[in-house]
Image (tube, helix red, strand yellow):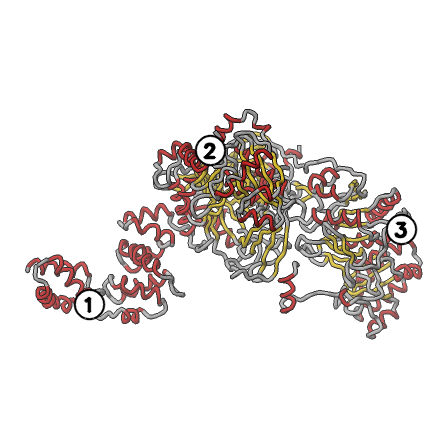
Amino acid sequence: MSEQFDPGNNYLDTRSRVGYIDFGKAKPSDYEELGFKCGLEIHQQLKTEKKLFCRCPAGIYQKNGEYDAELIRHMRPTLSELGEYDGTALMEFKTKKNIIYHIQNVTACTYDIDDTPPFAVDREALDIAVEIALLSKLNIVGELHITRKQYLDGSIPTGFQRTAIIGIEGEIPLENKKVRLIQLSLEEDSCREVSDVGHYRTYTTDRLGMPLIETVTYPDMTTPFEAAEAGHYLRFLARSTGKVRIGSGAARQDVNVSISGGQRVEIKGVSHISWIPRLTHNEAFRQKALLEIKDELSQRVKKPDGWKVSHRIIDYDLLSSRYQPISEAKTRGLRLVAVNLPRFEGLLSFFLQPGKTFADELSGRLKVVACLEQPNMIHSEQVSPDSVADEFAKLRRLLDASPGDVQVIFWSNDEDLPTAVETIEERCQLAFKGVPNETRKSLPDGTTIFERVLPGPDRMYPDTDSAPIPVEEDLIEKNRQLLPTEVHDQLKQLKSWKVPNDTYHYILRNNLMPAIRRIVDECGFEPKFVATTFGHTLKNISGKMLPADGFTYNKVYGLFKWVRENDLEKEIIGEMLPVVYEHPNILFDSVLTSISYTKNSREKILSYIPMLREKFVRRKATPDSAAETRWIMGYLRKWAVGNMPLKELRSIVEKEVADG
Amino acid sequence: MADLFKGYKGQALGLLKSYNIRVWSDTSVKTTRGDFRGIVLPRSENDDDRHIVLKLATGYNVGIAVETVLDMKEEGYKEAHYKIPEKEFPFSEDKPNVKLFGTGGTIASRLDYRTGAVIPAFSPGELYGAVPELADICNLTTEKLFAVFSENMGPKQYIKLAISIGKEIEKGINGIVIGHGTDTMHHTASALAFMIQNSPVPIVMVGSQRSSDRPSSDAALNLMHATKAAAESDIAEVMVCMFGPTSDEYGLLHSGCRVRKMHSSYRSTFRTLGDIPLAMIDREKITPLRDNYNKRRNDKNVKVLPYFEEKVALIYYYPNMMPDIIDALVDNGYKGIVIAGTGLGHVNKPVYPAIERATKAGVAIYMTVQTLWGYVHMFVYDTGRDLMSKGIIPAENMLPEVAYIKLGWAFGQTNDLEEVKKIMLTPVCDEITEREPYNGYLVFQGGIPEMEEFLKRVHK
């Protein structure tokens, strides 16, 4: 049987065994059958002047890899408050990373590099966090307790993130259900990663310490699309305060996914909400596939506890392959190691995600845990490169392999070799249990790779450097007075105004409701017209070019107001807006000139109609009243815009054309 | 009874009692701000009495305001037992024996709920559990002499420490490590340097600037460096072993009488002043930077001089200092005063009469410099000459804290002022050096282009 084994076919067979459905073709009932559950952790930076626990400015970034100094740190696991070591911490200690920080004086101080204890919490950040917590219907705590959440990946030089719960147990209303919120916390942001190669990981400290809130939902979303809907809602909610940062990296999502029989897996740092559906879809099926592997293994291996790999260091001469990474490994003087995985036939090429198999899980862990850069292994069920497939036949005897065993070859230095073997064994052993608790990194193609073991509550520790901060009633009351209209009420309002729903996303994402209301209230324009001017016209313009410096939504308000004061017809706004967007600092009068507006009386405009009709008849043989109206309107439009309503003009033209 | 409500007082205590809730109770709480559920944690004694602390299931702690509580109910009970995993420290024949004395400080520590601060944990087993690398360096035994923060270290502790170290050396130990809080580490270092003379083995003081309960702590690496220095180095002196740069790269071995804590929180806070450090140390090697130090010997001929007179003082001179400050010391029976004077060793004229009164009363006054770097030079200006004529004795380039410790040690041995003076001005261990090398004074200034270039290239 082993003779005929074809890994390519096996991939396709296992894909259908898992029942994988292409993204976009799956129905809600498919997700229900999987037992799909999804929860979100939304991180949103707050728009404050300073960082959360020091007085560095917030929101300034190092450009083009510039830095003033660097320093190097290592992280060691420590005990939690309740006396336990955290699993992630121990794994990350195994990786022995040298963490390098690139510091720039303008953006980081000695607090950021953990050489100074924290200063008092930034009150501006606290205010914003309380406001968003109130909007999220959370129970606000009586006292903030700054807690240290351990991160041993080095993304924070202290080895932990300072974070505090603002409120627990809230909810947000989606179209068809309410989603419960577990909590909202105020935290300091982490470093930005520059690179991660071998035993060296480099970060910049500019983003570090900026205030952000993390909103965590219960796993109440039962389809990938609901997950995106909740993501959008929470984003709109935060933006409705007008006090959060926008732009690249200002909001990031961690997405938790599980299916029946699976485990909570956290997909970290999803930078676009629109990526969530495909990522969660694939993760659900990845878990399904891992459960299939578990079933398969339980058939094959009766005593999983005794399952072990065996390995041997082998000679390069044993391989005839010219596979480039192996030749490079030889040049670098690395050891070549063959590992036998008993009874794993068909599993290395087992489908897990589109284009990815179980072997990719091994390779991913070798990179993260043993610091072996990819490509870091080949295996006996590899589809490409073809040149390595034959190599494994020779190895089988050397490793004393039985039929049904499969083999992996990796290359490593002496120091990382034992960890690498351990890592392969550990991941295979986890396959007997199903889905490992882990965090995964998202890729743009909608698949994920291993990032680290999922940390538990054991990584929390009270911050002994700071005292509790009371959240007094008057602080809550003050923020309650300032609350913006809730997002779902804004949606209701838009619907009642009969605003087309393709504008909602743009309006809420950019928090335009306050501007729309102001224009409606102060200038007396019809709400639907104002909302579509933003949601269609402005969206259209902003899709084509970036706004010039000085363009704000306040300019749009100014435009509406000016048009009203100058007694122009509202259609002129659509003509003027692109110019205002591109040149926000020129006078509205000049904008009119630039679009060649002239003042024309209604009578004068209408007086052109007979002449235009004659012209049309002259150039067009067959009478066509619709075409005639269109043609005449085409001419009149430029004289009419701003001077009389086009709708009215059109009906006059139509009438005249119809009357003959 | 009080133990059931660790740290709670006033209103908060009353609330817990009224609902019959103990610390470590898994409790559900109804409040005007909504419902909460978690384990009631002990409260820091210094925090207010208006809040109850809960640990939520997510691991976060929150405070509940007493005035918002409508109802509380105990749902269960889960007491935490914080313990560093203890593993027996392995012994191997071919490794040197090192003794670690504990005085407190944060080399290894755990949370103290009572104060919310960290308290030290210490046994060899605990240390091995936390820093297993130590077993590759030496056979380690430990003895906890005191558990005090470094600001509480004083003459009694210096004496007990010196005697204990002397005994270990006489028993044939290969090296000594002393875990110590960093604030007054340099005071203790100089006390030990005076009290333990002619040591055949290294005596290494170590601490940490970031407590060991945090992943980025310098404690583990400092401890590895210190035990390595004690086990392997041939420098048989009292030394302080702490981070060289703030980066996790290497430590420095500082001579115990020339070292000083120079930053309130930096890891690289300890610096040798007026000279260069004895050596650099990392996990692989010890690189001596000087060669004029006492070498390790095979004998056990240590000399312990465990004396200290507490009636000495160190005063930091400031313009407008009034003479009554000095008068008060004299009236209170102080035998010796060290002044940290300005510039080359000066104080203002209004103090003169007090100095005269003091010296006439038989109080010894020594002058050091608050510039920290440089020698006292009292012949340069009239002020200096005036002061000397009034009996003030210049203490060369002794650091003010070191001069203070030495004066206490000297008076511990004799009340004869001439004898004290002889002791004070005879160098024991670098506290007075004959010369200041050009690289003994380096306080770089940021912003200067070549310095910025250096900072970018070299890990600080």
Assess disc 1: are there few (<14), some (14-19) or many (≥20) residues with their C-alpha within 10 Å of its C-alpha. many
Q: Give the SS element for disc 3.
A: loop
- The C terminus of chain A lies in quadrant: bottom left
The three-letter amino acid code for the residue at tag 3 is: Leu
Q: Residue at x 37, y 47 (%)?
A: A487
Question: Is B185 left or right of B216, judged from the image as shown?
Answer: right
Q: Which residue is mark 1?
A: A639
Between A221 and A630, the one nearer to me in the picture: A630
Assess disc 3: are there few (<14), some (14-19) or many (≥20) residues with their C-alpha within 10 Å of its C-alpha. some
Visible residue check, residue A124: yes
Q: Quadrant of residue A611?
A: bottom left
The three-letter amino acid code for the residue at tag 2 is: Phe
- The answer to whether marks 3 and 2 mark residues whose Cβ atoms lie closer than 8 Å is no
Q: Give the SS element for disc 1.
A: helix
Assess disc 2: are there few (<14), some (14-19) or many (≥20) residues with their C-alpha within 10 Å of its C-alpha. few
Tell me the chain of label 3.
B
Q: Which residue is mark 3?
A: B305
Tell me the chain of label 2.
A
Between A647 and A88, the one nearer to me in the picture: A88
Q: Which residue is mark 2?
A: A5
The three-letter amino acid code for the residue at tag 1 is: Trp
Q: Are marks 3 and 2 on the same chain?
A: no
Between B48 and B261, the one nearer to me in the picture: B261
Nearest-to-viewer mark from 3 and 1: 1
- Kindly report the distance in space between the C-alpha atoms of the residues bearing marks 3 and 1: 107 Å
Q: Residue at x 44, y 31 (%)?
A: A260
Visible residue check, residue A462: no
Q: Give the SS element for disc 2.
A: loop
Residue A97 in percent (x, y) is at 61, 48
Residue A290 in percent (x, y) is at 48, 34
